[in-house]
Amino acid sequence: MAGSLHAQITESLTPGRVFGSILFVFVGLLVLDHIWKPTYPENIPVVGYGKGTVAGVKNFCYYVFRYRDWVIEGYHKVRFVRSHTTHRILHTAHCIPHTAYRYHTAHPGTGPGLNESCLSASPPSLPLLSSLKPRQLTRIAPETQYNKQNRAFVVPAAASRAPDIIIPRSLTKWLLEYPDSAVSAHEAHNDVLYSDYNFLGKVYADDVWHTRVIHRSLARHLGSLVPGIEEEVSVAVDEAFGTDTDNWRTLSLWDAWLTIVPPVTNRILVGEGTCRNKDFCKAMVSFVDQVILNCFALHMVPQIMLPVLGPLIALPNWWLWRKAARHSLPVIRKRLDDMAKKEAGDPAYDTWAAPEDFITWDIRMAKAEGNRFELDPYVISKRLLPIQFAAIHTTVITGHGIVLDLLSSDPAKGYMDGIREEAARVLKEEGGRWTKNGLSRLYRLDSAIRESQRLSNFSCTLMERKVVAEEGITNEQEGWHLPKGTFLTVNLEGLHHDDDVTPNAHEYDAFRTSRQREEYEAKPQAERSLEEGLRLKNLGMVTTSDAHLPFGHGRHACPGRFFVAHELKMVVANLLLNYDLKPISERPKPQWVGVTVVPPMDAKVELRRRKGTL
């Protein structure tokens, strides 16, 4: 009897049935996720495929490929008005990018968008229009623009995440005024990055110790760090781009930046020596890649399954950390020992000074606060991980974009020659070595980087926040109340490409801000006003505002942005001063996966070392 029952069970467990059961449970858990998500006010419009079960499935299926389109749609939203008298498509009174044209079936509630419009990647073709019946033909009429008219809208998110409410520029100040106890950047980042799993434990995710260390020490030591950064840039650029002065070389620009950024960044994290250890840098780059892959996977996991699947998906992170820790732990242990001997008055350490890097700063702060946990070498090595994530790929993407933007610009505009002239002049004035003051006077290069950050943004949205107040938050101006668990963010894509904010916003103008700054500097001292000087200073790439958001804005703006600015300026200046580069006819197009850009990693550049620069 028992054998017969076992045989029946075995026979019934076919691969198809097992897979079907797993799929059924998975879908059921996703439905529970949907039920548990916060309910948003009905008066906040929704882009994508609208609301409801069927729309939710469509949003889930298309999120990865259509998120950027939805973000653009929400910024330049135009509702369609049925027309019985015309067969023409009329442009709106506002400028709508070619990627944001919309068409629909003329039956409200049947298409995507606000239950009626369908976002197309290009303007509708004439065959499409000719296939419609006269009563189905529509014209575009400006009726509602969400972010442009200071309205928030809801954009679909990945399967297991609550949708984002994208607020307009006019509400940025309102959002930033909330205390962290009501609206939290930290909780939002933890949720988006699944920090409990990706960064090896809830204890590291809950405490922003590493961020406090950077806030406390990086900016104050940046001036003294410039010589070391310059040395690392010189070594890394030579390795990445070569030293052949006779032959042109074709290489992957992405690989070149991945050769440069990790050692330069780690010069201020783990110090000289370890930063040039290729095994260490390779492990850190692989760790960052793994975090990104894990995020995509975890986005699809029902929340109730995260405690089980999260640690399993993040297992490679532990392996990569251990690979890196083989090289960082000996340095950390020795630093702890050296600093202890120095404090104890060991005569052998009378002239010794701790290197200024993250390891030293971490130890100092832990001792100052009496935090023994943070003095554990393993803990310090893990504190490096989120900084690696924040610093490596974002800098690589930005640097990669700057070079492509410059090379694809019209050579007649003289952008590269202008930056070369400025860099050579300032470097000579500084005695042939970069200084903090000298880097601050690279107005053209600063402008070129800022412009590339604006036009070639690496994310559709930024400044993610999560409502954590039990009672939620209310915006009386808009007339809505947001419950606990709501996610809010800002429309980086729309804002940075808006002609009303930046004239000719879709054009790369490398000297957009430097012209004004150079004109001001050329004036006699008596003709310079303090107010104008302050205004122009705020045009620098590291100055954040509600219209310039690559580094965020407010009290949670990127604390490492001043270092990143120095790093990028030194790398690009080194590249242009020491190499000739061939222009490219057209900038390679990036792809978008959800909220994040995927740069054209196959982009190649042709260059040759300039004679007399070795």
Image (tube, rainbow, N blue to C red):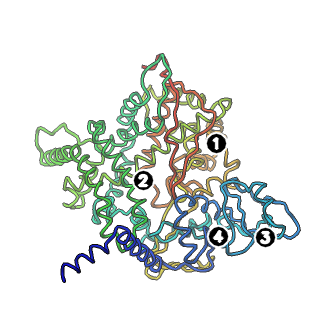
Calculate the distance from the C-alpha at mark 2 to the C-alpha at mark 4.
30 Å
Q: Earlier in the sequence, mark 2 or mark 4?
A: 4
Query: Mark 1 or 3, which is nearer the eye?
Result: 3
Circle 2/circle 3 CB separation < 8 Å: no
Q: Amino acid at mark 3?
A: Val
Calculate the distance from the C-alpha at mark 2 to the C-alpha at mark 1.
27 Å
Calculate the distance from the C-alpha at mark 4 to the C-alpha at mark 1.
28 Å
Eyeballing the image, is 19 above or below 275? below
Residue underneath mark 3: 81
Calculate the distance from the C-alpha at mark 2 to the C-alpha at mark 3.
47 Å
- Rendering quarter of residue 55: bottom right
Q: Which mark is residue 508?
A: 1
Q: Amino acid at mark 1?
A: Tyr
Disc 3 residue crowd, few under 14, some 14–19, many 20+, Cα 10 Å: some
Where the C terminus falls, by quadrant? top left
Disc 2 residue crowd, few under 14, some 14–19, many 20+, Cα 10 Å: some
Q: Earlier in the sequence, mark 4 or mark 1?
A: 4
Eyeballing the image, is 40 above or below 159? below
Left or right position of 36 against 52: left
Name the one closer to the observer, 348 or 157.
Answer: 157
User: Percent from the top left, x then y, of residue 593?
Assistant: 51, 55
Q: Earlier in the sequence, mark 2 or mark 1?
A: 1
Q: Which type of secondary structure does the marked residue at label 3 adopt?
A: strand
Calculate the distance from the C-alpha at mark 1 to the C-alpha at mark 3.
35 Å
Residue underneath mark 2: 559
Query: Mark 2 or 4, which is nearer the eye?
Result: 4
Q: Which mark is residue 151?
A: 4
